[in-house]
Image: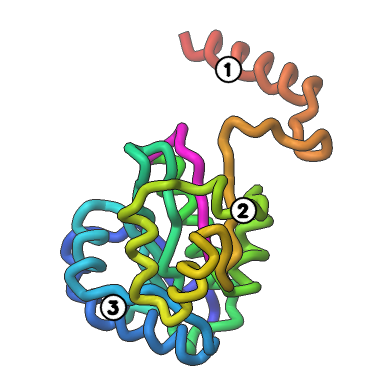
Amino acid sequence: MDIKDITVKFAEPHEKVYSELIVRLIYESALQRGTGIAKRTPEYIEQKITSGKSVVALHGDRLVGFSYIESWGHGDFVATSGLIVDPEYRHLGLAGAIKAKTFELARLRFPFAKLFSITTSLPVMKLNSRMGYKPVTFSELTDDEEFWQGCEGCRNYDILQRNNRRMCLCTGMLFDPQQPLPPEERPNPLVLKLKNGLNRIFHLKRR
């Protein structure tokens, strides 16, 4: 199996037919990892697909991966959630491709929002770190009550409650688009100047 045979894209409304399969894969993934996860219904997943807030990975007509976004706090925060890969398609780098596409979707739909993720998955944490997410305390995430109510279906919800929502088994991670890049990731100003010059020449030639 080659990842080049798999299409990772923004989900389209007709792909809501995969909702029940997605819910099952999310649940089975949580069982395999032995971790808690907030329960999702087919109707909830269907709404994410039809509203243009999800990403699917398809091998032909077979759904092999999924993730979605949701905005909170009047659009100030966006969560990326529900990342799953069919067990038969793991170890291909597919999770990274889905995560990158979900990140792209979130930045397109909510360019000024802070992106966050809470997860117990070490691979997801590593993927987040590569995209610029930083570990943060829960107090730096959204205070939207509806978001935290979504954790009630998680088997670790009592831990969250006992700690007054300050911490749980999940790790909170945040990408802030206003946060300046570290020096090693900043673009070289000479390269930018050269690119701008080439762009001006290109446009002049087209006139």
Q: Position of residue 149 (x, y in %)?
A: 33, 62
**Distance Cα–Cα, label 3 vs label 2:** 40 Å
- Relative placement, left or right, of 95 versus 53 is right
Residue 181, quarter of the rendered image: top right
The residue that disc 1 covers is 202
Callout 3: 10 Å neighbours few (<14), some, many (20+)? few
- Relative placement, left or right, of 13 versus 29 is left
Disc 1 secondary structure class: helix
Q: Amino acid at mark 2?
A: Thr
* Above or below, 170 relative to 188: below
The residue that disc 2 covers is 137
Q: Residue at x 66, y 51 (%)?
A: 134
* Above or below, 40 relative to 139: below
Q: Residue at x 55, y 54 (%)?
A: 138
Q: Nearer the viewer, residue 62 or 139?
A: 139
The residue that disc 3 covers is 61
- Relative placement, left or right, of 103 versus 22 is right
**Distance Cα–Cα, label 1 vs label 2:** 47 Å
Q: Nearer the viewer, residue 189 or 125?
A: 125
Q: Position of residue 102 (x, y in %)?
A: 45, 56
Magenta stretch bounds = 109-118
Callout 2: 10 Å neighbours few (<14), some, many (20+)? few
Residue 128, quarter of the rendered image: bottom right
